[in-house]
Image (cartoon, rainbow, N blue to C red):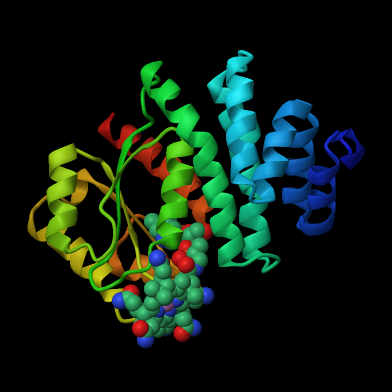
Amino acid sequence: MASINDISNEFVRNEIDEYIKEPDEREGLIATYAAISSRMQSIGAALVDGQNKTVDALTVEALADGVPALEIMDDGLIAAMRIVGIKFRENFIYVPEVLSCARAMKAGMAHIEPILSASGIKPLAKVVMGTVKGDLHDIGKNLCIMMLRGTGFEVIDLGVDTSADEFLAAVEEHEARLMGMSALLTTTMPNMAVTIEAFIDEGIRDDVKIMVGGAPVSQEFADDMGADGYGKDAMECVALAKRLVKEDAAQEG
Ligand code: B12
């Protein structure tokens, strides 16, 4: 089993040591980082520290030296976002810091995305994502989108204040089989159910897997409204999206 001392980057080592307490997550991150090159660890350290210019420069340099784009994305950027996600969940950092890290991730992804799309890697699936009608909160949705894109999903972002008709139109236009709704207000949560009803009325509910999330949403609420899944954070959103794609493929036979 890898030990924390197998991680060469001092910043990353200290971050994991200080902030990642849950045993499974800690063990997983230590194993991940022990296997990651020191160069990719430096990108991760800059991301966790919210240094978007450093992430930008290190990504450009690594690509120029022939490091594969996928390696930079997985080992440099996404692994670091796992640390950020856990620190945020445990209240070690707050929205402004998460936004800095998100900006740093975006700076790296800006160089990676064109290479991945040009290399013709088939997207895992198309996902339509939006914040529901009446709700203008989009920070969490945008984090989910970034993580989904980073994992290889093609995301159609409908933005905020999205009506049931807009969700319907986008799913039909893009032939998406996966959709995600976000809500941050107790007053707008019912609009998730309204949207699901619209898919039933249109006769296409079985054609799309629907996932929901946002701070006031719970698994119970998701079950009550007939959603296919609930995720409490961006990491769960990605895991859920992958699971729903698999279920969909299995049902399609
Ligand atoms: C930032 C913020 C704002 C910003 C939004 C900026 C923006 N661009 O998003 C501004 C200032 C605009 C704002 C406005 C308002 N806000 Co506000 N806001 C917040 C605040 C502080 C943080 C929300 C946030 O971004 N969290 C960080 C993100 C990362 O977390 P998240 O959104 O939960 O997302 C994560 C998960 O939920 C999940 N997730 C999210 N979406 C999805 C989707 C899927 C499919 C999945 C699987 C997972 C998933 O993954 C995300 C990443 O880990 C919250 C307080 C709080 N603690 O939630 C209040 C809060 C949500 N706001 C609140 C209120 C009342 C308002 C206003 C009505 C205030 C007013 N009187 O005008 C307005 C409403 C505007 C509107 N119509 O939407 C209340 C809601 C209370 C309630 N019970 O409904 C809160 C809880 C504050 C409070 N305690 O009173 N707000």
Task: State whether residue 196 is above or below residue 221.
Answer: above
Q: In the figure, residue 159 lies in which quadrant?
A: bottom left
Which residue is found at the position 14% from the left and 53% from the top? 168
Relative to 223, residue 154 above or below:
above
- Which residue extends farthest left? 202
> Quick check: 88 above or below 156?
below
**Ligand 1 lies in quarter:** bottom left
User: Which quarter of the figure has residue 156?
Assistant: top left
View extreme (bottom): residue = 187
- Judge from the rendering whether residue 236 lies leftward or rightward of residue 137; answer left or right: right
Along the line of sight, the residue nearer the viewer: 178 or 155 = 155
Q: Position of residue 94 (x, y in %)?
A: 61, 67
Q: Position of residue 192 (x, y in %)?
A: 27, 67
Q: Can the viewer see residue 13 in this picture?
A: yes
In this view of the protein, which residue sits in the foreground, 24 or 19?
19
Which residue occupies the foreground of this view, 14 or 4? Answer: 14
- The N terminus: image quadrant: top right
Q: Which part of the image, by quadrant, shows the C terminus?
A: top left
Residue occupying the point 86% across, 33% down: 8
